Amino acid sequence: MQELGMQQRNEYIVSQPIVDSLYFRNNGFCVIRNFITPTFVERLRIILAATKSGTTFDTIKKNTYNIGIDEKGIIEIVENKVFAKMIGSLGYDDCFFSDGVVFETDPELFGFDWHLDITSFKYIFPEDRAFSIWIPLDPIDQEDQDGGMTMLSTTSFSGCEFFKLQSHVTRALAEGRYNIPNIYKTLLGPKYRNAEQKRFKKLFPFIQEQFPHLFSDSLYISGFSRYLFDCEGVSYSLVPGDAIIFDKTVFHRSNPLRPGTLKTRRAFVMRFIEAKSRYNAVNAVKAGGDESILVRRYARGDGDSFDLASAAVARINHNFTNGVEHEN
Ligand SMILES: O=C(O)CCC(=O)C(=O)O
Ligand SMILES: [Fe+2]
C-alpha cells in the first residue's frame, strides 16, 4: 500500500488517501482508504437526499445522473494536487470530471447485475481511457448487510472488447451499413418496456433460481459466465470516506443489501474521462440512456478533442528534466 502524503490539506479530500497503485495497474481497480472527509460525506448525503429518483432501471431505488456537477467541493477535489498525484500513480494522464451519479438501493431490490458503464462512457472512443470513483455514503460490512460492489479483475475478463463492439455496431447502424430490428437499437435493448415484457420479467426470479446456469437476461453474459464472474469477483468492506476506483473496462456489480438496521444504501459516483480523449459523437447520440450535461458542455465535433477551458481537470503535472518526461 502506498501513502500519497503531501502537506496540502483541504476541507474535502483527506491529506493521505491510500491506494495500492501496483494492484490497480494489474487489475483495473483498487480501494481508496481515506478518500474524503466526514464533512464531505455529509455534504454528499445532503445532495443525494435532494436528488429525485431517475427512471431508467427498476432494480435500483435511485440512479440519477448530472448530480453535484457544479458543486464547489467536487471541483476542489478534482483540482487538488493530492488527487492528481493519486490518479497519476494509477497510470492516467490529465482527466476531467465528466459526471456525478447517485445510486441508492435497499433490501427489496438487487441493484445492478454485472455490467459496464456504457451510458457514462459512450462519449469517447473505445480505446480512450476513463474511470469511476464509487463513494459509499453508508458503511459497507461484507459480514453483515453488505450492499457493496463486486469487481472483476481485467486479468480475468476485460470489458474493452465490448466497448469496441458496441461502438463499431452503433457506427455501422448510423452509417446504414446494415439494419437491425428496432428492439436492439439502444443500449437498453429489449429490456422490459411493454406489458408483455413486464409480464415475462415476473417469471425471472423463478427461472433464475431453477436454471441459473442456463439462463441470463444480462446484456453481456450468460448464466454460466455470471457464475465464473462471481467466483473471481473481489469485494470490500468500507467505511464512509473510503471509495473504490475502477477503470471503465472493469466489469462490476452491486452486492444486494441484506435486511438489517441499515434501511438503505447510498453511494455517489464521480466519473472521469482522460483529457486527450476524442468525442465519439455518433456513439454519444445513438447509444441511448441518460446524457451528461458536462460532456455536452465540453463536446465539439465528432472525433475532435474536448474543449476543457471551463472543465474541472486533474492535472497530472508532467515534469520535463533533460528532455525526459517523468511524472511527479
Ligand atoms: O451503487 C451501485 O450499486 C452500483 C454502482 C455502479 O454500478 C457504478 O458506480 O457504476
Ligand atoms: Fe456501474
Image (cartoon, rainbow, N blue to C red):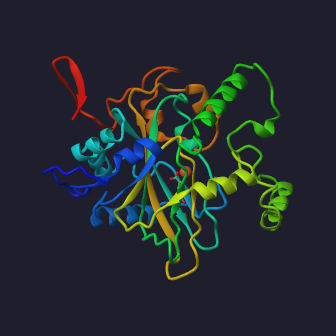
The image quarter in which residue 171 lies = top right
Q: Is residue 55 left or right of residue 193?
A: left
Residue plotted at (80% across, 36% down): 182
Number of numbered discs present?
0
Whether residue 159 is visible, yes or no, is yes
Residue plotted at (58% across, 55% down): 232
The C terminus, quarter of image: top left
The N terminus, quarter of image: bottom left
Q: Is residue 269 left or right of residue 326?
A: right
Residue sitting nearer the eye, 70 or 79: 79
Q: Is residue 289 left or right of residue 269?
A: right
In this rendering, the answer to whether 105 lies above or below 64 is below
- Residue 9 place in picture, x, y as percent: 17, 54
- Residue 158 place in picture, x, y as percent: 57, 40
Whether residue 55 is visible, yes or no, is no
Residue plotted at (64% across, 65% down): 110
Q: Is residue 5 left or right of residue 116?
A: left
In this rendering, the answer to whether 298 lies above or below 38 is above
In this rendering, the answer to whether 100 lies above or below 139 is above
Residue sitting nearer the eye, 86 or 63: 86
Residue sitting nearer the eye, 290 or 276: 276
- Residue 3 place in picture, x, y as percent: 24, 53
The image quarter in which residue 112 lies = bottom right
